[in-house]
Amino acid sequence: MDSQRVTVIFFAIAGLDILNALDKINKQEVIEWLYAQQLTHEIKEEGMKISSLFFILSPPNSNESTNMKALQNFPILLLFVLGEDRAGFRGASFFGFPYVSCDDGDYAEKIISNNKYDHSHIANTFTALCTLKILGDDLSRVDSDALIRSLKSLQLETGSFQAHQGGSENDARLLYCACGISALLNDWSGVDTDKLFGFLQELQNYESGFSFNTGAECHGGITFCCLASIYLMGKQDEMKFKDTLLHWCVMRQNNGFQGRLGKTPDSCYSFWIGGMLQLMGHLDFINVEELRDFLFSCQSPVGGFMKYPLFMMGSSPYPDLVHTFFSLCGLSFLGKDHLEPVDALFSMTARASNDIVTNRTELPSLVIKK
């Protein structure tokens, strides 16, 4: 999981925020680690290109730990510098210079690292920005200009996005990340929204939902990513078949929600499908008790939530961060269990997203009204 460690951290931090338990972690240490994964633009010094350089910036004052106290007197934040087309956040430091805590060496020295494979990833960039927002960071240390230029270079002629400059799959998951990044930074200059919307329209099929590829089967997670992207761009009034999409979402509930027609209900779809119902203003169409009972049947004896109920034949008894986070989101939509309200558009609590500029004309009800 090293290549996706930033995203794994998002699921943990965002879940703690829903539980109103961010006081259990050292927020500043997480913030500093995340910024250490930022790759920024290339710099030039007296006409000479410095292509891959760690340089040093002064971090903010903090009294949260011994490490942070040391930072007050010693500027150590390491920021990786690369070509502009690779700006953003990487998944972890495993490809580049390793993350170094304040007790591990001399930070006054500039360290050269010429690893051409050390580049940002669109999903890690989105989840890093989300996590920073959840932790209360103002994103002032994000190299927004370089990041947006890098994002622009990832959009393909079809309107879709690839994950990084090395080439990758290109589907609606990455579109959602691109739109989320643009909204979080309040800068849409890196996205051709008309071209992107045209690509999304090609993915909508006879079921009114969206699929990985043109003409393929509707998928709950992909449909959420497409719908959320449309709302982030402010193009929801241009969307076709909204009423039948709403019907498709409602019909995905058995007890829990399934992701596709005829599939077994899965705890993560309480977010993917429930989140779409929130966006469309119809959380009240959820059978509350059925979903709540299903989600608690997926709760592991060791804590956290599993994909399927424990009593299902062949079900793993081990929870994971992804299904735990999405299950907490689903329970939050129900307005019970003393959980923080979740804003599905950004996959974070409403208190974390409340100052993000959006194209929404009004905020939908975040929980089912009692």
Image: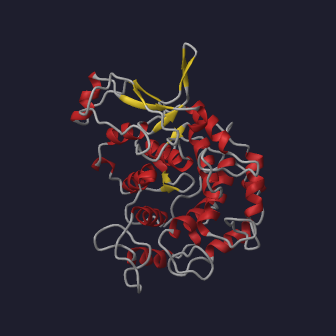
Residue nearest the observer in this picture, 240 or 171:
171
In the displayed structure image, the side of residue 4 where residue 365 appears, left or right = right
Q: Quadrant of residue 33?
A: top left
Seen at 72% across and 48% down, the residue is 156
Q: Position of residue 184 (x, y in %)?
A: 56, 41
Q: Residue at the left extreme?
A: 66
Percent across and percent down for residue 47 are 58, 15
| One can see residue 259 in this view | yes
From the viewer's perspective, is residue 248 above or below residue 73?
below
Image quarter where the N terminus lies is bottom left
Q: Position of residue 285 (x, y in %)?
A: 59, 72
> Where's residue 2, x and y in %?
41, 52
364 relative position to 13: left or right: right
User: In this picture, is 130 found above or below 236?
Assistant: above
Toward the viewer: 123 or 206? 123
Q: How is the image coloured?
A: secondary structure
Question: Which one is nearer the viewer's eye here, 303 or 169?
Answer: 169
Q: Is residue 158 above or below residue 53?
A: below
